[in-house]
């Protein structure tokens, strides 16, 4: 049965005549806005002040939308697709990493931002970039099998961590500011101590990789990585149960690890009919976890789970593949980059009611 | 409708007995002939073929015909090569430095997106019909009569059921090696010593002689040749069991493809005529870019080391090098970051014997969606391979009084690619 969809082409501001519920209810998550680019998107990020959403696409540009005014800007300068972003706490500086190996730094306060600095971070793709909790360092990883730490002031290389034997897919700082985690194609998670400059320990996410016997190739890797706000837990999004990865037949998974013990805490998977990749994971400040994924058919889903539970308590089916996920600082909105070129904003409250109804 | 994922059932391990069984079936084929004239064409030199088959369909956009920054260009960049003005994908940095030894054909349109049809067309030079593979033709016309090795050897970690020799006779059929494992059954069966084995051979020959009286020679010839080839393989048991040199493994890589290419080098050095090495894993309907990173990362250095070794040993002049697939991949990127089957506008690389190095034949449009210059198909390529080897592909196979055109009479060689 076809259900009439609300007009969601406007930005958040378009909903103002309506009365929005403030109560966060994940089960009532619904789309409230859409921003459109002409090319399929690969990633997105919202700045900590909730002003902008930025997105990478299957082109060389970064799209920037002002969440309130809908004004769109395009940042040019990368030589390949942009896969990862991070913002400074004040939202004024954007860091972007591309498949070409470069990390670029942008001043978002400029009307037409140009890259302030380009760091040739990796030989081969720079898959991930993250800013340290103290806002002084960047961590990157790439296809040269290295994890690197950079001084954000001048782009100086501060530390290099080697030890991964396959492409490194994602990296993040632990909130303690001392440790880094990185995960590679084979599900090897390494925890690096920046004080000693050495490998501290590891975690086993080998469940998140598979060798496709038919095609003789490995498939895996973290497609998103995030610590819980208190640093007690690490979430990694990706795949498991590789059956025929060349046709996209495998299961999405979000694995949770206990930071202290390094042990696996949970394997969160959607319904078995949903085959594809988990592309995004975020911890909500209220304690629940949100995931996003793409099915091989081209559809998407958002997943919600409560701490300690082994199954999602709510799944929102999306008509298009979700290729990432980020959370606005207000705690009420999610942004998702989609394979059809749109970034959609979803509100985790009851739908708005017209004033007076 | 079932979607074609490419992907046929497997898999076939080599066994000497299996080989002999195949040969027995070949005894009813049309037999051998026509070789003397071809031998005259190739002037007594032992010319060889190295086929590197990128199974599943390597993406031309991630290899030989990159279109960075265009609508369907993907995330990878183009890099300059050792040939001024020629750029290939950044996924092939080692190969890029050796492109002066190779040439590219960027304008292939085989008008099929089916794995089997594409593979057969690329191997036989014909869209349909029972015709021999290029490797079987090499076995028939290029293999020395005293060769210690079968004329057409295929090294693969898995394989497809191919009848490659058609009317040329089963002794020219593809002999499959399951990776670097020695062929099975090389040792004499338990309880059979060498003297007893020799007596069995004598007995078989007596039966053949008796059976052959008043019958065409071809009816026993395939059996005889196959038994002889099997005996030669058994005599070279230690060759197959020898472990590769550690330094070579470092250069080639310790993965299956590295080991398989080292075996290919050893076979070619020991007068094998056509050696095909299959590198699997290019049928990337999903995650095309991550898979090409992995697969071409493995291919690039290994293939380059093999090319260097053939070059340094002076073998490249007499060895035709083919790097090919059954088709390319769609310019359009699907929702799974995949590229699908695409026979409409794609590329291969050739080099070595009879091939002009450093050339680029043909052109695709800006987005890579169509050939815009010098369109060719597998029929043209087939003529080109044979002409490069000194075989007149416009000639006929002379099979027991029947004349069968070697190459498709409606296609021609790519003359400007020939040295």
Image (tube, coloured by chain):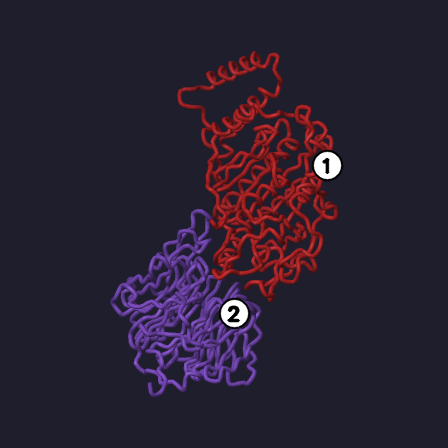
Of the chain colours in the picture, the one used for chain A is: purple
Q: Residue visible at 33% across and 63% down?
A: A255
Q: Residue visible at 66% across and 51% down?
A: B105
Residue position for label 2: A57
Q: Quadrant of residue B264?
A: top right
Q: Position of residue B67 (x, y in %)?
A: 61, 62
Residue position for label 1: B394
Q: Chain of mark 2?
A: A
Q: Position of residue B231 (x, y in %)?
A: 52, 25
Q: Chain of mark 1?
A: B
Crowding at dot 1, Cα within 10 Å, few <14 / some 14-19 / many 20+, comes out as: some
Q: From this viewpoint, which residue is outermost toward the left?
A: A308
Q: Residue visible at 47% across and 31% down?
A: B15
Q: Position of residue B246 (x, y in %)?
A: 49, 45
Q: Quadrant of residue B39?
A: top right
Distance between the alpha carbons at the discs numbered 2 and 1: 51 Å
Question: What element does badge 1 sit on?
Answer: loop
Of the chain colours in the picture, the one used for chain B is: red
């Amino acid at each position: 049965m076809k259900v009439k969809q609300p007009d969601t082409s406007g930005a958040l501001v378009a909903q103002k005549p309506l009365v929005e519920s403030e109560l966060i209810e994940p089960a009532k998550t619904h789309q409230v806005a859409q921003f459109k680019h002409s090319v399929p998107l690969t990633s997105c990020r919202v700045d900590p002040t909730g002003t902008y959403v930025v997105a990478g696409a299957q082109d060389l540009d970064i799209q920037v939308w002002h969440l309130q005014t809908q004004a769109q800007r395009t940042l040019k300068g990368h030589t390949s697709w942009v896969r990862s972003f991070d913002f400074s706490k004040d939202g004024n500086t954007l860091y972007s990493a591309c498949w070409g190996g470069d990390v670029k730094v942008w001043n978002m306060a400029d009307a037409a931002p140009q890259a302030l600095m380009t760091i040739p971070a990796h030989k081969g793709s720079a898959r991930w970039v993250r800013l340290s909790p103290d806002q002084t360092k960047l961590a990157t990883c790439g296809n040269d099998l290295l994890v690197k730490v950079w001084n954000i002031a001048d782009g100086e290389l501060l530390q290099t961590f080697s030890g991964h034997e396959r492409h490194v897919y994602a990296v993040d700082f632990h909130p303690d500011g001392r440790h880094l985690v990185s995960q590679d194609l084979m599900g090897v998670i390494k925890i690096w101590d920046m004080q000693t400059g050495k490998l501290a320990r590891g975690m086993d996410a080998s469940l998140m990789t598979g060798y496709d016997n038919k095609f003789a190739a490995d498939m895996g890797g973290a497609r998103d990585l995030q610590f819980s706000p208190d640093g007690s837990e690490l979430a990694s999004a990706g795949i498991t149960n590789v059956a025929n990865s060349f046709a996209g037949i495998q299961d999405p998974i979000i694995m949770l690890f206990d930071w202290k013990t390094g042990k696996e805490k949970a394997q969160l998977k959607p319904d078995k009919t949903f085959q594809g990749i988990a592309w995004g994971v975020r911890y909500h400040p209220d304690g629940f976890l949100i995931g996003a994924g793409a099915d091989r058919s081209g559809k998407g889903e958002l997943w919600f789970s409560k701490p300690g539970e082994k199954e999602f308590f709510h799944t929102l089916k999306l008509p298009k593949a979700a290729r990432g996920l980020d959370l606005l600082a207000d705690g009420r909105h999610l942004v998702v980059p989609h394979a059809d070129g749109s970034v959609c904003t979803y509100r985790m409250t009851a739908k708005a009611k017209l004033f007076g109804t | 409708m079932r979607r074609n994922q490419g992907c046929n059932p497997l898999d076939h391990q080599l066994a000497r007995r299996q080989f002999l069984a195949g040969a027995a079936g070949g005894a009813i084929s049309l037999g051998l002939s026509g070789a003397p004239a071809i031998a005259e064409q190739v002037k007594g030199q032992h010319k060889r073929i190295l086929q590197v088959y990128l199974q599943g369909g390597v993406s031309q956009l991630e290899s030989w015909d990159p279109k960075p920054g265009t609508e369907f260009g993907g995330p990878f960049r183009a890099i300059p090569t050792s040939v001024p003005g020629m750029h290939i994908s950044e996924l092939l940095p080692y190969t890029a430095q050796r492109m002066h030894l190779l040439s590219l054909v960027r304008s292939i349109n085989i008008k099929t997106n089916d794995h089997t049809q594409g593979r057969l067309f690329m191997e036989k030079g014909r869209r349909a019909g029972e015709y021999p593979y290029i490797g079987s033709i090499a076995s028939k016309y290029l293999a020395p009569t005293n060769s210690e090795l079968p004329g057409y050897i295929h090294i693969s970690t898995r394989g497809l059921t191919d009848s490659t020799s058609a009317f040329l006779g089963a002794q020219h059929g593809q002999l499959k090696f399951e990776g670097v494992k020695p062929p099975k059954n090389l040792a004499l069966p338990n309880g059979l010593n060498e003297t007893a084995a020799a007596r069995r051979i004598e007995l078989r020959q007596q039966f053949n002689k008796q059976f052959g009286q008043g019958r065409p020679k071809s009816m026993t010839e395939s059996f005889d040749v196959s038994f002889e080839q099997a005996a030669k393989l058994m005599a070279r048991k230690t060759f197959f069991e020898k472990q590769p040199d550690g330094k070579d493994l470092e250069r080639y890589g310790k993965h299956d493809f590295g080991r398989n290419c080292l075996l290919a080098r050893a076979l070619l050095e020991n007068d094998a005529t056509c050696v095909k090495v299959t590198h699997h894993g290019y049928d990337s309907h999903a995650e095309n870019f991550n898979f090409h990173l992995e697969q071409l990362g493995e291919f690039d250095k290994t293939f380059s080391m093999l090319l260097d070794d053939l070059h340094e040993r002076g073998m490249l002049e007499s060895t035709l090098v083919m790097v090919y697939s059954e088709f390319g991949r769609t310019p359009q990127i699907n929702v799974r970051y995949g590229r699908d089957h695409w026979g409409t506008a794609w590329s291969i690389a050739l080099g070595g014997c009879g091939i002009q190095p450093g050339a680029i034949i043909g052109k695709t449009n800006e987005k890579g969606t169509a050939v815009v210059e010098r369109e060719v198909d597998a029929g043209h390529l087939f003529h080109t391979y044979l002409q490069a080897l000194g075989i007149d592909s416009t000639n006929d196979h002379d099979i027991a009084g029947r004349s069968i055109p070697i190459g498709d009479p409606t296609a021609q060689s790519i003359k400007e690619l020939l040295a």
